[in-house]
């Protein structure tokens, strides 16, 4: 998965509304140390997440140790980027993700390619000494209709 899709993936994980385990089982203080470490960027807003959102994020945290270092870095960066987004930017990221997912496969591929190119362009504009890639603002990427 390309790194520019991580905010969209997180948006989808946080926007889901399926039933999940009881709220008490996912209270922050009941998470394991490793789960809290992975999800640390979201600690302040953890109480506001639904049980489903918490369960899906816990799935990411539990899978995290099995990922290679590049994938782990990507997860860390994306969780940090998500935590810095405003409520409106998050809403827009969720909306954009839903729009892209509803497109026909060919159109979705075109949009993904444009997002990839925009992300690469922003990366190329940053200083070579920068250790992290710039974040594509989810509010600025809206799929156009055919």
Image (spheres, rainbow, N blue to C red):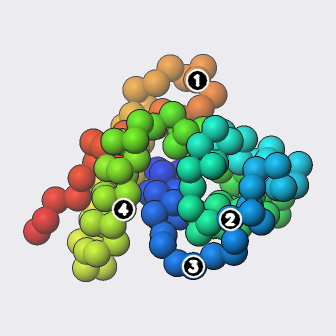
Cα distance, mark 2 to mark 4? 26 Å
Is 102 situated left or right of 63 in this image?
left
Cα distance, mark 1 to mark 2? 40 Å
Disc 2 vs disc 4: which is toward the camera? Answer: 2
Nearest to the observer: residue 76 or residue 123:
76
Q: Quadrant of the N terminus?
A: bottom right
Q: Position of residue 52 (x, y in %)?
A: 59, 69
Cα distance, mark 2 to mark 3? 11 Å
Is 44 situated left or right of 99 in this image?
right
Cα distance, mark 1 to mark 4? 28 Å
Which quadrant of the structure image shows residue 136? top left
| Label 1 vs 4, first from the N-terminus | 4
| Label 1 vs 3, first from the N-terminus | 3
Cα distance, mark 4 to mark 3? 21 Å
Q: Position of residue 113 (x, y in %)?
A: 33, 59
Vertically, is 116 above or below 119? below
Query: Which residue is tagged 4?
Result: 97
Q: Residues within 10 Å of mark 3 (few under 14, many from 20)?
A: few
């Amino acid at each position: 998965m390309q790194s520019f899709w991580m905010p969209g993936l997180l948006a989808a994980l946080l926007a889901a509304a399926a039933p999940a385990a009881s709220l008490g089982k996912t209270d922050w203080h009941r998470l394991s140390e490793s789960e809290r470490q992975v999800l640390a960027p979201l600690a302040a807003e953890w109480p506001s997440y639904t049980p489903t959102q918490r369960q899906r994020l816990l799935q990411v945290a539990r899978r995290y140790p099995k990922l290679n270092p590049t994938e782990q870095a990507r997860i860390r960066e994306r969780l940090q980027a998500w935590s810095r987004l405003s409520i409106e930017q998050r809403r827009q990221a969720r909306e954009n993700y839903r729009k892209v997912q509803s497109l026909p496969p060919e159109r979705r591929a075109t949009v993904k390619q444009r997002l990839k190119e925009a992300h690469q362009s922003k990366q190329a504009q940053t200083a070579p000494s920068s250790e992290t890639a710039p974040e594509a603002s989810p509010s600025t990427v809206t799929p156009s209709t055919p």
